[in-house]
Image (cartoon, rainbow, N blue to C red):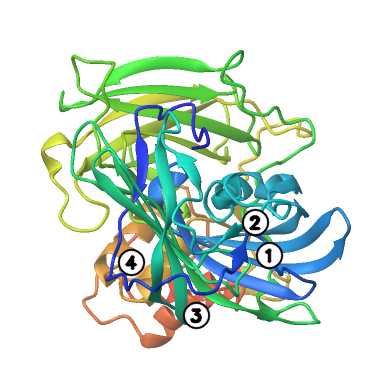
Amino acid sequence: MRFRSPFLSTVILVVVLVGTVSMVPNVFATTWYPGQGLKTGDYYRYTIADVFFHNLAPFEMDFWVKNQTSSGSTLEMVIHDGSIIQKGIVKVGDITPDPTYSDPNLADYVNVYRLTLTWLDSFAQKTAPVDILSPVWGQTGIYGEVSLGSIGMQNVTVPDGTFSASTLHFHDSGVDSYLWVAPSLAFPVKAHVYAIKTSGAPTIGYEYSLLEHGNSAQPPSFLNVENTNPLGGSASCPTPDYATDSVHDTQSTDSGSVAIEYYYSPKVPHQGCPMGWRVYFEPVFSATQRISDIHYDIYTVDDKGHELESLAQSLGRTDIYSAVGDDEQNFDEKQPPPVVHYVIYVAGTGPQSGVTDVSKAGLIKVDVKVAPPFGSSTPVNSNTSSVTPPANNTSVAQTISIPSWVKNNAKWWSQGQVGDSEFVKGIQYLIQNGIMKIPATQTGTGSSQPIPAWVKNNAGWWAGGQISDAEFVKGIQYMITNGIITISS
């Protein structure tokens, strides 16, 4: 097996079969290798989740073969990862479809591609294909002592349809492992992978399933997207370097139930530049162990302890799940200098979906010194968007400043995921504390009247970029004027 992660050397990955295998005699020898038959215009779409990448948060990987040469293929790849969309170029080899180049914004995702979709090239390549029904493809396991081979054909159903696939099997550490390979496809159809852990219930290690495949002479419609949330900032931005430019510490949560060891890098990040966090969740009196199945979040707060921005919410999730008790996250530092208050919050433990045990819930606080953005002589809060409406619009003639993450709240409110009172209280707090600025508005007395539907509709349209900040503010002003939102002087 290939080496997968410097942080999780105690984890062994295995695949668990779902379904019944039908044995078929090897009457016809059909050879196969990853990438076989791949040609210009082919496209594949998968859903993938990997324990070594964001702890099993699923994402979609779509790629189209733009062109081919004697040395390999050029893929145009699109990633849908929560609220993040990334698109770029990936080049793969001819002998094996392992990546030889990728645009930097795709590097982490391409590593997942290499360790999941093309893993079988360890046993089969263009120069050495194997009989797809051979009972022995090769040896795998930690020491190469386990035999991998086919046990016959099986009908396997995925979103793309039902395929007759060779079922590859190996048995390691007391668990049976399987992969499904259809002779007509260049990549496997499906995998369902579990991690064997030192504690906790079995957890998926990685899984993928074919959503769609086909051939198109023109770029498929799934390529008609633009990158969102790219890390990078100024060319002057330093990149996270945990070896020489990081802060390292360990704190116990306020509840005393979990010790959180963490690194962040750079030591002094610049606003608008990338920073990285490595976190390890440990029993309070044993730094050599990990607590499995952790649900957590990293968020920032203001000086009064009120939440400003949640990493989980920015990724489109309610929390971040760590199956094996450690994780690494990278994101842009959006908060202004001189100090940003971070909170690492443990929500509890439990499976990725289902009831979370809150007995280990708790948090730690970490203050991070932040430098101004590059190219700016004064600190600028890049976490706000400002517009100055036309002078003839007297109701919104002043500058509007709204934290960008309010759009998430507006979206959830418009969809009914956040209640009216929660949204109103949040907006009221932001205005009273100067975090959100709107034009001067006549205030009404407290009112129990319902919020008009158009106000909520405006919030949803604003969150989706369909109307301007000024149009959204009109709804806020209406609620203030009519006493739905009360602003103290």
Q: Single out the residue that lies furthest toward the right.
A: 70
* Image mark for residue 485: 4
First of labels 1, 2 by sequence position = 1
In the rendered image, is residue 489 in sight? no
First of labels 1, 4 by sequence position = 1
First of labels 3, 2 by sequence position = 2
Picture layout, residue 372 above or below residue 460 = above
First of labels 2, 4 by sequence position = 2
The residue nearer to you, when weighing 68 against 444, is 68
Give the alpha-carbon distance from disc 1 to disc 4, as whole Å. Answer: 63 Å
Seen at 33% across and 55% down, the residue is 318
Picture coordinates of residue 346, whole percent (x, y) = 26, 37
Q: Are marks 2 and 4 in contact (CB under 8 Å)?
A: no
Tag 4: amino acid? Ile
Q: Are marks 1 and 2 in contact (CB under 8 Å)?
A: yes
Q: Residue tagged by mark 2?
A: 129
Determine the secondary structure under disc 3.
loop
State which mark lies toward you, 3 or 1: 1
Picture layout, residue 293 above or below residue 191 = above
First of labels 4, 3 by sequence position = 3
Give the alpha-carbon distance from disc 3 to disc 1, as whole Å. Answer: 19 Å
Picture coordinates of residue 471, whole percent (x, y) = 57, 76
